[in-house]
Image (cartoon, rainbow, N blue to C red):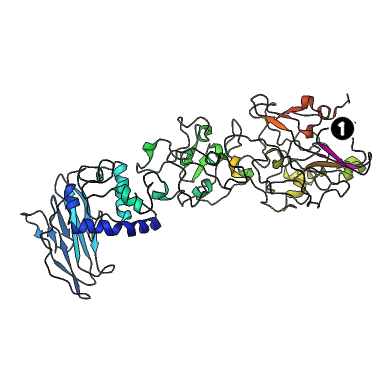
Amino acid sequence: MARRRGDSMAHSRRCTGSLRRLALAAGLLAVAACGGSSSRSAGTGTAKGQAGLYFLVNVSRPVNGTITSDDGQLRCGPAGGADDACGPARYDWSATATLTATPAPGMTFGAWAGDCSYRGPCVLDTRVSGSDKWVAAAFGPPGQVGHGNFTSPTVHGPAYVAFVSGAPDAFACNAAGCHGANLTGAGIAPSCDDCHAKAGFPSWRTNCSFCHGFPPATGAHAAHYGLAGRETTSTYGDVRVLQDLYPAATPTTAPGVYAFGCGNCHPIDPAKHLDGKVEVTLYEPAAPLLSLKARNASTAAYDAASGTCSGVYCHSSGQELPAFATAPGWTSGAHLGCSGCHGNPPRYASGPAGATDANSHLGFPVGKGKEAGHFLGMPGPYHGSEHGAGNYAAYYGAWGATMKASPITCQQCHFDTTDPSSTGSSGFYWLDTTGDYHLPGGTASRLTTPEYAQLQCTSCHYTGGKSPPGVGRVLPLRHVNGSRDVVFDERPLPASLVNGLPPDPYRPVFAVWAYSYPDFSLSYGRALPNVTYSRPGTTGSGTMSLSLSGASYDPSPGKKTCSNVNCHFFAPQGKVSWGGRTTCGPCHGIPPT
């Protein structure tokens, strides 16, 4: 099979000595065994060229074909025929001799041997090796013709690919008298397995990197399979992902790269491999049921002109019934952020509570103009909070002027998918701040209105932002794995973080927190589990911080319920449904009961 250049050189050094001696010292016995000629009686002579002045070319008399030179000096055919000029032919030291092999009717040309190898014209000169030349050619019946010296992987690699792909003029490597039915050797033809094993590639038949690199060093292959420097963990048609390869790993111990098997983009059918075509097949009815490929649209396709993929689950909203995005061009070098697939935060329209298209990440309700959903922060819509600092006196007077709260970022609910080390200076856990935070309905003309300017993320991140762009990322182990993993972040705030937080004695303990003046009485006198109050006394301004310990999510169809999430205080039975609307009463107990 074809090898990369470095592999080829190493392989050639190991195998060249033994095979060259075998092929050349025995004349062309290997050729004869597979239908060629072993004769070297004509034209070999004892005359020698003179270095710097001229060199001599001899050809071995062929069977079933003719060898000719472009200048007419050599025209060597079967014994007893009219073509008896087999050499030596004399050429000036700086000249070039070009030979052509022509099979007899009904025969086929196999390959050159000697100082030329494989097929095509044989070009001889003294630039590489300043010595006399000897050449032979193998001819024979189709499917039976053999070859001579195939020591270089760059020669026998393409020949092997032609053989396994069924090319009409390919060598029959497993023919009688050649390398054996299983390529384990026959006669003087060596075992392919033994030779490759000596070169360090015992798995040459199944190792993808043996032929074209794994992943191939072209386009966006490395972005889709980044386990560089490893022996292949994939086979043709493999639809596994990183999580399948590292089932016992955690998001932080697993490699921080994606590893999509070949079958996610190429055909699953092994018969499509080595058939002489590079095929991108994004939809196959036979794809395993739970694989990413099975989640692609039936119209998923690759546009070779633009190099883009469409209808693939990997570039979609990630829902059970996903909305698909068009991927960047394969050779564009573009790298997608969160907004390139599902929005940052996800902003697809929400269906009913618990439905397959439910979405409580983000909303923009008609009316007061405040965004709703989980991305904006605690306490929630209409509360006027802005994490770290706030000035809502125009709307809420003194109380609004002192209101502060954390945001609810991706980490709070997707702890196993995001980088836990990404921690904002104000004490909350955060993700990439380069998202498009303008919501539906937020036209450019509205950006100057006080109401829209108060939006949680717009006010800080729209023009330059206060946080460094690109900081915070997803971890590949559970990202783009076919499921929507909800794992709550139960960590307390790092003690080292103080910037932007209310100072002692108001400093929050957990990452979800709110500070308010005057009396923080959100609980209406009732006890809340896993809630910490930070304030000097029993009344007055203070900070309430909420632990997500014990929170859980039920992804069952029609349910999609969160339980024991302190953000929702006294929701009925402690449960809320994803995609549903929550008013003040279910959380605060209004009116108190």
Q: Which residues are magenta?
A: 519-546
| 532 or 431: nearer the viewer | 532
> For this view, does 14 lie left or right of residue 237?
left
Place residue 9 in its image quadrant: bottom left
Q: Give the prevailing secondary structure in the magenta stretch.
A: loop
**Could you say whether the residue bearing mark 1 is in a helix, strand or loop?**
loop
Q: Quadrant of residue 181?
A: top left
Drawn side of residue 395 relative to residue 464, left or right: right
Q: Look at the image and say whether residue 535 sits in the magenta stretch.
A: yes
* Towards the viewer: 467 or 50: 50
Q: Position of residue 409 (x, y in %)?
A: 72, 42
Classify 92 as above or below 363. Answer: below
Q: Percent from the top left, x then y, of residue 410?
A: 69, 41
586 or 413, nearer to the observer = 413
Q: Is residue 366 visible?
A: no
The residue positioned 39% from the left and 54% from the top of the image is: 4
Q: Position of residue 43 (x, y in %)?
A: 11, 62
Q: Is residue 500 left or right of residue 140?
A: right
Please state which of residues 162 and 494 is positioned toward the viewer in this rendering.
494
Of the residues shown, which amino acid type is indicated by label 1? Ser
> Which quarter of the picture shows residue 578?
top right
Question: Is 505 displayed left or right of 576 in the figure?
Answer: right
Q: Is residue 538 magenta?
A: yes
Q: Which residue is mark 1?
A: 523
